[in-house]
Image (cartoon, rainbow, N blue to C red):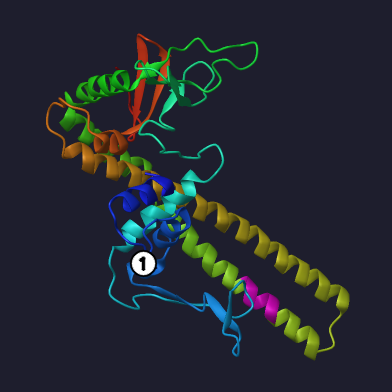
Amino acid sequence: MSYHGIAKKLTADGIPTPGGKEKWSISTVRSILSNEKYKGDALLQKSYTVDFLTKKTKINEGEIPQYYVEDNHEAIISPDVFAMFQREMTKRGRGKNYHSSVYAFSSKIRCGHCGSWYGSKVWHSNSQYRKTIWQCHHKFDGDERCDTPHLCDEDIQRLFLSAANKLLVNKDEVIANCREMMDLLFNTTELEAEQATLLEETQLISDMVQQTIYENAHIALDQTEYQKRYEGLTQRFETAKQRLETVMAELDRMQTQRADIEAFLESFEALPDTLTEFKLENWLSLVDCATVYSLDDIRFTFKHGQEVQA
C-alpha cells in the first residue's frame, strides 16, 4: 500500500492519529514508518529550542550535534523489518519507480508496446453500465498509438490466478531454485571484506591528512613538498571514498533484492497447492508486474524474477 492507502485505511477503521485526530495524513504515516524509535533506537536532538522565552523550536538541520543511540529502549518491530521499510520507501521514490496504490492494480500492469503503465478509466460514468477498465496511459497519445487491449478487474484477477497456479504446479522446485539462486547471486562476503578494508583505509588516510596539516602548522616545511604530499593524500582519500560508496551501494542493492525474494518465498510457501479465488494480499506479495502484449499474451513477472504467461 502507498502512504495514501495506509492513511485512508486507518481513517476508515476509526483509529486515531498520535495527535488524537480522526483523519490520517500522508505525512503522519511517512513519519511513523521512518521513525527509528519503533526499532528501539533513538536519534537525539532532531529539533531544538530557538527561543526559551517563547518556547519556539526548529528542526535541526546541522546547527547543533545529533546523537544516535542504539538499543535505547524496547523495540516494537525488529531492525530487519524497519530496514525493509526504509529500502522500500527509497526504492519507490518519485521518479520512474513511483508507486501508486490508489487502486489494487496501480503501477502493476505495463504496456508491452511502449512500456508505460496501465491506468484506470471509467466508461459510462453516469449510467447503469458504468465500468472501470485498465488501459495504457499513452494509448491515444501522438501518432503512434498502442494497440494493446484494455482489461477489466475481472480479467486481471482471472489471469493472475492462471499464472499463479502455473507457478504452483512446481512449487517445491521454485522454492529450491530460489534458495540456490540467492546463495549464488547474493553472496556478499567479498564485498563486506572490501568495505571493511576501505573503511579502515579512509580513516587511516584521514588521520594522515590531519597529521600533515598539523606538522605544517607547527614545523617549517618546504611548501612545495607539503602541497605535493597533501594533494597526494587527498587524492588517495577521494579514490578510496568513491570506491567505498560504490561498494556500499552494491551491498544495499543486493540486500534489497534478497529481502524482496525472501518476502516472496515466505508468502509463496504459505499458499495452498491451488488458488481458487483472488485475494489482494496474494496479488501484492507475489506479483512484481504484469506485461500486456495482446489478449492472448499477458505475462506475469513474479517478485523472484520468473515470468509466467497466463
Residue drawn at x 54%, y 76% as measured from the top left: 47
Residue 65 visible to the viewer: no
Q: Residue beneath label 1, please?
A: 20
Instruction: Assign a secondary structure to mark 1.
Output: loop
Residue type at mark 1?
Gly
Q: Position of residue 158 (x, y in %)?
A: 25, 20
- The answer to if 123 sits in the magenta stretch is no
Residue drawn at x 38%, y 73% as measured from the top left: 41
Name the foreground residue: 69 vs 21: 21
Name the foreground residue: 214 vs 151: 151
Rendered position, 4 above or below 145? below
Q: Position of residue 4 (x, y in %)?
A: 43, 47
Residue drawn at x 57%, y 12% as measured from the top left: 145
What residue range appears in magenta?
A: 205-210
Q: Position of residue 260 (x, y in %)?
A: 34, 43
Q: Quadrant of the C terminus?
A: top left
Report whether 89 appears left or right of 226: left
Q: Quadrant of the N terminus?
A: top left
Q: Position of residue 223 (x, y in %)?
A: 87, 77
Report whether 252 appears left or right of 198: left
Residue drawn at x 44%, y 55% as measured from the top left: 25
Rendered position, 46 above or below 256? below
Name the foreground residue: 225 vs 65: 65
